Image (cartoon, grey):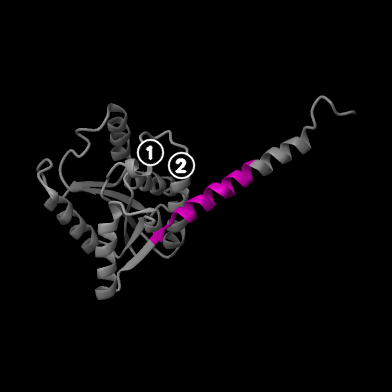
Amino acid sequence: MKNLFVTGYRAHELGIYNNKHKGIPYIQQAIRNKLIPLLEEGLEWVITPGQYGVDLWACEAAISLKAQYPQLKCSIITAFSNPEEKWSDEKKVYYEQLLRQIDHYAAVSKEPYQGKWQFIARDELLLRKTDGILLVYDEELGEASPKFIKQRALRKQTEEGYSVLTISAEEIQSVADDEAETQFDDVQAYELLDPGEGSST
């Protein structure tokens, strides 16, 4: 697999409204965990639609892996021009910083938002240009916007052998649990190394 389409929930669908949310690093680590085996097998491009949420967190995850995997490139291909136009200033700054770090940016439609057809055209292009999709989406938590791209990807899988990979809520929770365990171990190790003032010497 050379080109991977990565997408999933929009931030607001997860109740996330800024980049300080403590859940974002766990989502990014779950994405990295999926990307690394693919990178070992020759993955070259991570391509996202650039919506605020999983798409942009995936770009950050990919950028963080570039030192270890210099062949990796990252692209954002949006449905229409200036998708960030109505975002808050904080989100705009974050987006502009990210655009400076990625390798490629394009908009399927050069016009501003006009209608649903722009999203359909974008998804068709991304499915056509990639060998597989990594979807951060868990239907057990209820339906959300990734439902539609998942349906199309599964159809392409049946017809053409397209790869469909997913990250569930359980996998993200597992990353969070591992992190909590590591931090607990660090605290224990620190306590062993430095028993504190009450200890006798």
In percent of width and height, residue 151 lies at: 27, 63
> Which one is nearer the viewer's eye here, 180 or 103?
180
Instruction: Read off the residue under disc 2.
Output: 23
Q: Is residue 34 left or right of residue 77?
A: right
Reply above or below: 2 against 190: below
- Residue 34 within the segment the image draws in magenta: no
Q: CA distance from mark 1 to mark 2?
A: 8 Å
- What main secondary structure does the magenta stretch of the protein show? helix
The residue range painted magenta reads: 166-183
- Residue 172 within the segment the image draws in magenta: yes
Rendered residue at 21%/56% (across/down): 123
* Mark 2: amino acid: Gly
In percent of width and height, residue 7 lies at: 32, 52
* Mark 1: amino acid: Ile
Q: Is residue 13 left or right of residue 115?
A: right
* SS type, badge 2: loop
Rendered residue at 18%/54% (across/down): 122
Label 1, residues with CA under 10 Å away: few <14, some 14-19, many ≥20: some
The mark found on residue 84 in the picture is: none
In percent of width and height, residue 94 lies at: 33, 33
Which quadrant of the structure image shows residue 196? top right
The mark found on residue 16 in the picture is: 1
Which quadrant of the structure image shows residue 187? top right
First of labels 1, 2 by sequence position:
1
Rendered residue at 44%/47% (across/down): 27
* SS type, badge 1: loop
Whether the residues at callouts 1 and 2 have beta carbons within 8 Å, the answer is: yes
Rendered residue at 29%/54% (across/down): 146
Q: Is residue 108 left or right of residue 7?
A: left
**In this figure, what is the number of numbered marks?**
2
